[in-house]
Structure formats: C-alpha cells, structure tokens
C-alpha cells in the first residue's frame, strides 16, 4: 500500500519567514495530494490540494509543488503569521487505494511573533 | 452550509466497555470515513462507508465496526475497549466515490479509556 513520509515533525519560524514542509510517497499511481491544517481541538481543514497533472499550485501565501518523478511534494507558506501555527498533514491517494488518502504523520508549525 | 458534525465531543469509558460515536456528513455527501488519531500519530484510516455499505476498512481489529444509515449519517462502534483505544476519532465525508475527492472533516470525538 501507499506510504507517506513527512518532514520535519516540528518547524519553528519567526513571523514573516517562510516555512517549507516536505512529503514523499511510494505509490507511483497516486494522483491526488491534499494538505490539511489542524488547529488545537479541531478537525483537519483542507488548505490546498494538487492533482498529478499539475506541477505547482498557489493560493495567496500558500503554494504546493509536486515532483512526480521523484515522488515528492511540498507545502510552502510565505510571510508566516502567528495564526499559521498548527499541525499540517500531507496526504496522497491513488486509484488502487480507492482514493482513500494515506496521511503523513504531521508537522507542528510554530510561528513566533 | 453545515459542516460535518460529530457527537459526543468527549466520551469517557472504562476498559472492556463499548463506545458508540456518531457522525453526520455534509448534505449531499454519500461517503463517510472514520479515522483514529492517537497522540503523536497521524490519521489512521479505520472504515469507509458509502451508500449504506462498508467499502473498505483499515488495519484494525473486528471490534471496530460501524454502519451507515439511509440518511448517510454513520456510527462507529468500538467493543471491548482497551486503554490504547484512547484517541481522537475523526469522521470525514466526501461527495464522490471512485475519484479523487476532497474529504471534509468534523471536529472529532475525544475518547478516553480508563
């Protein structure tokens, strides 16, 4: 089955800096890659997603890049703000897995004011 | 539009008891997924229901079971509770089966087993 590795597990940045979270996946048939943000006491919320026919997608301060050859994808947050502090999860899904996403273990992002 | 709702918010049980968790999907969504999120771990897939049937289950013992009702709401049952079942249980819903579809999560039920 699919295996998703996510790094780093913890990321501490100063307000205004950029943050990058990286994920690798094992199933070359995976074609959908969502990113979720989970704030304390809440369920994960989708922040951006990318499909395998696209190499990059941007939404204001958030961008995701996908390298299908290397089987890795990354989340980029620019101009970080304290409210960006949360746990971020990447996921990958494939037809072979009924499109049920396999999640990474999460990255705890701390943005210091 | 109302999001995914789950009840109860918190649930405290003792070892050996049974727990029942409930989920209402977003209106129009037919697929419901259950995940376990134990402390420090990612989301572990438990069960997937669509159109009233169990479509897939993760690597969990049979004492984790559930069902989906005609209105697409769902119930997760955990029998013979063990201490390691303590976790946040998340429900998600999506609109499509058989295609990449965004899952929308509820706030979760925090289950504590004493």
Image: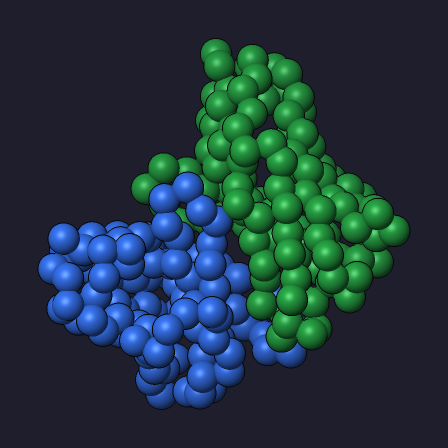
Q: Is residue B109 visible?
A: no
Q: Would you say B54 lies left or right of B79 here?
A: right
Which colour denotes chain A? green
Please name whichever residue, B22 or B83, is drawn nearer the observer in this view of the structure.
Answer: B83
Question: Count the marks: how many?
Answer: 0
Q: Which colour scheme is used?
A: by chain
Task: Please report the residue visible at 46 percent of the width from the left and 59 percent of the height from the top.
Answer: B44
Q: In this view, does B76 lie to the left or right of A36?
A: left
- Name above or below for residue A16 compared with residue A100: above
Does B14 sit above or below residue A62? below
Residue sitting at x 56%, y 53%: A103
- Front one among B105 and A6: A6
> For the point 48% across and 12% down, which residue is it?
A113
- Specify whether B18 is left or right of B87: left
Image x and y of residue B60, in percent: 41, 70
Visual hue assigned to chain B:
blue
- Where is B34 relative to A40, above or below? below
Residue B106, picture quadrant: bottom left
Location of residue B1 by image quarter: bottom left
Q: Is residue A26 visible?
A: yes
Looking at this view, is B39 or B98 the one in front? B39
x and y percentages locating residue B114 in the rendered image: 14, 53
Q: In this view, does B59 lie to the left or right of A11?
A: left
Q: Quadrant of the N terminus of chain A?
A: bottom right
Image quadrant in which you'd find residue B113 = bottom left
The image shows residue A70 at horizontal and vertical percentages of 84, 47
Kindly identify the residue that appears in the image at 88 percent across and 51 percent down. A69
Depth check: give the residue in front, B37 or A112. B37
């Amino acid at each position: 089955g699919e295996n998703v590795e996510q790094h780093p597990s913890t990321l501490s940045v100063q307000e205004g800096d950029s943050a990058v979270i990286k994920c690798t996946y094992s199933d070359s048939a995976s074609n959908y890659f969502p990113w979720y943000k989970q704030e304390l006491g809440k369920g994960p919320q989708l922040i951006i997603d990318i499909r395998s026919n696209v190499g990059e997608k941007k939404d204001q301060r958030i961008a995701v890049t996908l390298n299908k050859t290397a089987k890795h994808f990354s989340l980029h947050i620019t101009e970080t703000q304290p409210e960006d502090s949360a746990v971020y999860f990447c996921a990958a899904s494939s037809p072979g897995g009924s499109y049920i996403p396999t999640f990474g273990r999460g990255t705890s992002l701390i943005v210091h004011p | 539009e109302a999001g995914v709702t789950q009840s109860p918010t918190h649930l405290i049980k003792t070892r050996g008891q049974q727990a029942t968790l409930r989920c209402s999907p977003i209106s129009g969504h037919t697929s419901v997924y259950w995940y376990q999120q134990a402390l420090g771990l990612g989301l572990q897939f438990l069960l997937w229901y669509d159109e009233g049937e169990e479509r897939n289950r993760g690597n969990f013992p049979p004492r984790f079971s559930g069902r989906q009702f005609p209105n697409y709401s769902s119930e997760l049952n955990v029998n013979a509770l063990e201490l390691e079942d303590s976790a946040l249980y998340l429900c998600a819903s999506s609109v499509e089966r058989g295609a990449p579809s965004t899952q929308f999560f509820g706030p979760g039920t925090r289950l504590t087993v004493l």
